[in-house]
Structure formats: C-alpha cells, structure tokens
Image (tube, helix red, strand yellow):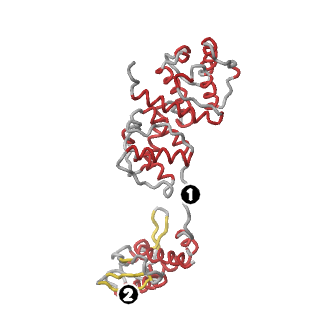
Amino acid sequence: MAPEPVWQQLQKKTFTRYINGKLASKGLQINDLYEDVKDGKILYHFLEALTGASLKKYGRLNNGRMKIQRVANMNVVFAFLPDADVKISNIGVLDIVDGKPKSVLGLVWSIIAFYLVRDIGGGGERDVAAVKRRVLRWARRRCGRRAPISDLTKSFKDGKAFLAILNDVDASGSPYEPSQNPVENFERAFSDAEQKYGLPRMLDTSEDCWRDEISMLTYLASMMETLPERVEQPDTGTSTDAWLDARSDEIGERLATLCACASTPSDNAGRSAATAILKAAASRAGLTETALGSSRVFSSTIDATKPTLLYHASTHVEKPHNAAWRDVVDAAPFSDIVKDGRVTAAGSRAKGSCLAPFLACEACQERSLN
C-alpha cells in the first residue's frame, strides 16, 4: 500500500488532536481517527461539544458493535448536519462507517469549518475564505515586522511567526528568541501555547508541519480564539508611568518654565537659562555633571556600577518657530498652538525631549532608594 500523502498525514494528526481537545471535558479520546469515528459515537459527541446542542431528538445511540448498528448511529449524525448548517458534498454514511480516509477527513473538516465560520468568520461573509482573511490579519498584527506574514503556510515554515505571536501576548513570559532551527522554534511555541493557555498541540514539531493550509488554519484559528489579547506584565516596583502620573502637575510646571526660556540660536541668555533648568533636573536625578567638549556627561552618584548617561540634546527652537518666536525680545515663548483640536505650547515637544531623560533617571533613583 502506498504511503499517505503528506497533506493527508498532517490533517489526520491535526484533526485527531483538535477532536481530543474538544472532547476532553467529556472524558473521551481517540487514537486512530479513521477507526475511532466508524461507530458514530465520537462524531455524535464532537458535534454536541461544538454546537452546544443535543442530538437526542435525532435518534438514540447504540453500542455500535455491528456494522448495521454503526450505520444507525451514523444516520443520527448525518440527520443533524443540515440543521447545524454543516455542508458536505459526495460523502455518505457508509464512507465514514468504512473508514475511508479522504471521506473522514472531508467530513471532519466540514464540521470544523462550520465552527470556525460561526465563531470567527464574522460580518456578512459566512465562509472559510472570511475566516482565512481574519486569521491572516490577526497573525500580521501579532507578528509585526519581526516575522512578516503573507500567507498561512510558508510564512510560518521557520517557526519564528509562532514565537512572535506568543511574545506579543506575553513579552516577559515568552521572549522572542528564535533559533535558526525551525523544529526547535516549533517545539518552543507549541509547548508554550499548550502549557500556558491549554491549546492542544495540533501540529507536529516537524519541518513539514506548515505545509497543509487546512491544518495550519485550524491551529491558527484555535490560537486566535484561545490566546488572551495581552498578559499583564510583572511590576518591578513603582513604574515610571505611575511616578510621572503622581507628579504630573509638578512636571508640567517644570516643562512650562523650560518652555518660557526663548532659547533660539541667537539668544545666549535664553540658552543659559534653559541649561540651568536642565542641570537642576540632573541634580534632582542624582547625577553629577562633567563637561566633555560641547557635550555633558552625567554619572550616577547612587551606584558607581550603574551605567553613565551621555546626554546629547538641544534646547534650541528654530527661528521663526511660529509668530511667538519672531521677535526674541518681545516673544512669549509659551504661547499656545492649536492643531487638530489639541492645544500645545510653542517649543514644548523639543524641550520636553531634553527634560525626559532626567525625569526617567529621577524616577529610577527614587525606586532604588525605596
């Protein structure tokens, strides 16, 4: 007998694991897909698990020991399919009872496809193509630039995309550290998804696991359904954001004072005033200053082992920045600018960039002291 085609092997393994995942709550499990669906009982319970409906009104199950009994059970399953909007073509009861591989795979995929279309398809498009589009968009958003996604097969062949998806969900718990060995990447990703989120390993950790689109769609759609949007990241102490929020009024005043210095390139007094404000901010952050040519080096006085901060920034606001800067002597540098419905101060973005590193160092200093 000729060996099964690769696509057939992949689908058999994927569908077996998918069914086992859905039937785990019922305490049921299959080992050989083609054999174990012959009596109709597994498909009966599988459909109940997927749809949440009871099949009792379509007929009662028997023990399925004889072929005629297996046919009777399968008739119950097939009677339910039209009502569940599961579409099948050229697959009959006897095909499944006899365990014909292509027929079994076709029927199981039709059932899974119904479930995916119902829960993932969304909108007015009720077909598998709509599911594929949604899963593809989801994968692209999750992977970003680290693993460009153009399809549901070749884009995943090195395993990096699976790792990128998991890293996007939990940056600290699932670091993006791909190997050059695809099998290692598959193993890490599938193990991580199973252990953290209970997602069954539907795909083998082999170099060929990505080759069948139906198997990939089944697994990726399950990932999309199972994974949370984000896992809350551990808090190592008072976060910088929380520190800034608690001092927003004070920091706003400090930025306003800096913005009030009309430090255009030709205004030496304004530049000196702005520099003095920034040096005071460095001092508050526990940094000591050393001149290095036209740059300034600030180092920590808290811990000599901490990195030194090489500060490179400019408080200049080019002239004319807007009408408020045209006449330096009479300028009101903190004049408001209205753009797209938002009010900002002239020069605030440029000068805020100068102040931000010292605020971050100040937050870190307070954290280390507490």
Judged left or right of residue 124, residue 207 is: left
Picture coordinates of residue 276, whole percent (x, y): 42, 86
Above-or-below relation of 258 to 218: below
Q: SS for tag 2?
A: helix
Q: Closer to the camera, 258 or 27? A: 27
**Earlier along the polypeptide chain: callout 1 or callout 2?**
1
Picture quadrant where residue 320 is located:
bottom left
Picture coordinates of residue 32, whole percent (x, y): 53, 26
Q: Quadrant of the C terminus?
A: bottom right
Residue where numbered disc 2 is placed:
272
> Which numbered disc, 1 or 2, marks the residue closer to the eye?
1
Bin the neighbour count of mark 2 within 10 Å (Cα to Cα): few under 14, some 14-19, many 20 and up.
some
Q: SS for tag 1?
A: loop
Name the amino acid type tagged 2: Ser
Q: Closer to the camera, 212 or 250? A: 212
Picture quadrant where residue 337 is located:
bottom left
Above-or-below relation of 246 to 203: below
Name the amino acid type tagged 1: Glu
Judged left or right of residue 366, residue 305 is: left
Furthest toward the left, the residue is 293
Tell me the CA gap for discs 1 and 2.
44 Å
Picture quadrant where residue 136 is located:
top left
Picture coordinates of residue 260, whole percent (x, y): 45, 81
Residue where numbered disc 1 is placed:
232
Above-or-below relation of 229 to 87: below
Q: Quadrant of the N terminus?
A: top left
